Amino acid sequence: MEKLRIEGGHRLDGEIRISGAKNSALPILAATLLAEGVMQVGNLPHLHDITTMLELLGCMGVQVAINEDMSVETDCAEMKSCVAPYDLVRTMRASILVLGPLLARYGEAEVSLPGGCAIGSRPVDLHLRGMEALGAEVEVLDGYIKAHVPGGRLKGAEFFCDTVTVTGTENILMAAVLAEGRSVIKNAAREPEVVDLANCLIAMGAKIEGAGTDTLVIDGVEKLHGCHFDVLPDRIETGTYLVAAAVTGGRVKCKDTDPLLLEAVLDKLRECGAEITTGKDWIELNMHGRRPKAVNIRTAPHPAFPTDMQAQFVVLNAIAEGVGTVIETVFENRFMHAQELVRMGADIHVEGNTAIVTGKEGLSAAPVMATDLRASASLVIAALVAVGETDVNRIYHIDRGYECIEEKFQMLGANIRRVQ
Ligand SMILES: CC(=O)N[C@H]1[C@@H](OP(=O)(O)OP(=O)(O)OC[C@H]2O[C@@H](n3ccc(=O)[nH]c3=O)[C@H](O)[C@@H]2O)O[C@H](CO)[C@@H](O)[C@@H]1O
Ligand SMILES: C=C(OP(=O)(O)O)C(=O)O
């Protein structure tokens, strides 16, 4: 099995290009199922999850072609199945995103239940209730969500999400765009990736108001057409490299990103003592060799501090001056990185949804195991600052979400390589 071997102690310095956002690309690829005609999606990151989504579309009969500029073209003219099989879904929860488009366009869907994972139980009850509100009949049988639309076309409805859910909002939105009449999604997620999906659907001919607010109003149309759409930059990848620069006392400029996507993260980085400068599509962090000051974090849905940046800030606090409290309110089990960081010498006490992190002057290398995507990123950051050589095992998680991670860190001066 592959691992990342990292020799710590090198201050990061340089520039990198930020990739397209995984969490935007996945729903947009699922939305291509709604298009009559060819869809073209650009700025796709080269990631395992993207390959999985393309494989999933392919196994349903979607023709997928990759252009020279790495944009992807899809055509659903020869759809042959509305089944998302367990073997693909189990490797990527976001496969559930095909449920809404399949029901909206083809009136039927059979999607394997994604199951739990390291960060929490992650039920999909709101996705299912949303589909039922729009008139689908849904049952869960033999590990599959089996749903169909009596009469063939969904009907517009009002739906209140009792928990803010990102992929839930996206699924219901994609179902509602082809439903008959008006739908309203209340307490909708406001994440930039939801807005990006809405913009893509609008470019395909959908009628959607309120993207970026907690109320989405959708007037269903009879059909959607293909278009070209570039996915937005990855705010979590951006934040991860900025935190890595901060913990090593270094300087990193992230290009092809957007500072407006990660205001809560940039505020915390400023609070920890980093100098941040921004332009329309770039962000530079300079720590001037200083040690960061500990910061308190509370994760919550956008525009608050994102849960996908929590693990990285636990590492920042672990080497900072002072004590930082990190409260995780989105997922019930997202501190799996804490015990691995403790093995590297960090002082972290987890009680329920709170981690109290007392900063130490340094960390020491140790073999560590990645448990999920952002936990893996936090271990890589810890290894960059630790004394000695760290092996980060189980890096298949990291390849789900970080394009060319070792090449990008190498460009910033890190000593990191992939070994068998
Ligand atoms: C592919 C993708 O975009 N993944 C992101 C998405 O995940 P994902 O969309 O799966 O996360 P949700 O926003 O749905 O989860 C938020 C909370 O709602 C709960 N919940 C969700 C759905 C449901 O039907 N019932 C329910 O109770 C979850 O267990 C969790 O506690 O948003 C998360 C929260 O920002 C991010 O960490 C993930 O990176
Ligand atoms: C939790 C994440 O992704 P997913 O929802 O795909 O598991 C993530 O991107 O941090």
Image (spheres, helix red, strand yellow):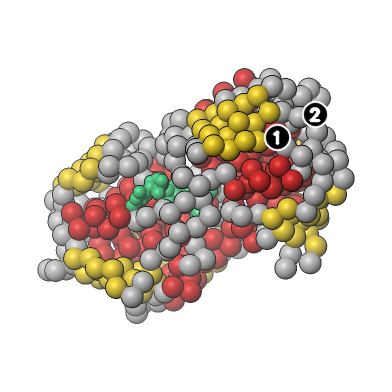
How many angstroms separate mark 2 from mark 1 (CA)?
11 Å
Regarding mark 1 in the picture, which secondary structure is present there?
strand
Label 1 sits on residue: 347
- Left or right, 34 with respect to 337, comes to left
Q: Residue at x 18, y 56 (%)?
A: 134
Question: Which label lies toward us, 2 or 1?
Answer: 1
The residue at the far right in this view is: 388
Q: Residue at x 24, y 53 (%)?
A: 130
Task: State the residue at coordinates (66%, 54%).
Answer: 370
Q: Is residue 364 left or right of residue 123?
A: right
| Mark 2: few/some/many CA within 10 Å (<14, 14-19, 20+) | few
Q: Is residue 329 left or right of residue 7?
A: left
Specify whether 130 is left or right of 371. Answer: left
Around disc 1, counting alpha carbons within 10 Å, would you say few (fewer than 14), some (14 to 19), or many (20 or more)?
many
Q: Secondary structure at mark 2?
A: loop
Rendered-image quadrant of the C terminus: bottom right
Question: Residue 189: where, in percent of width, then height?
Answer: 36, 40
The image shows residue 288, relative to residue 123, as above or below, that is: above
Q: Can residue 233 be seen in this snapshot?
A: no
Residue lying at 54% horizontally and 37% vertically, measured from the top left: 351
Q: State whether residue 89 is above or below residue 325.
A: below
Amino acid marked by disc 1: Asp
From the Cβ of disc 2, is ligand 2 less than 8 Å away? no
* Front one among 350 and 212: 350
Q: Which residue is mark 2?
A: 361
User: Is 110 drawn above or below residue 242 in the view shown?
Assistant: below
Q: Position of residue 234 (x, y in %)?
A: 55, 44
Q: Position of residue 14 (x, y in %)?
A: 77, 36
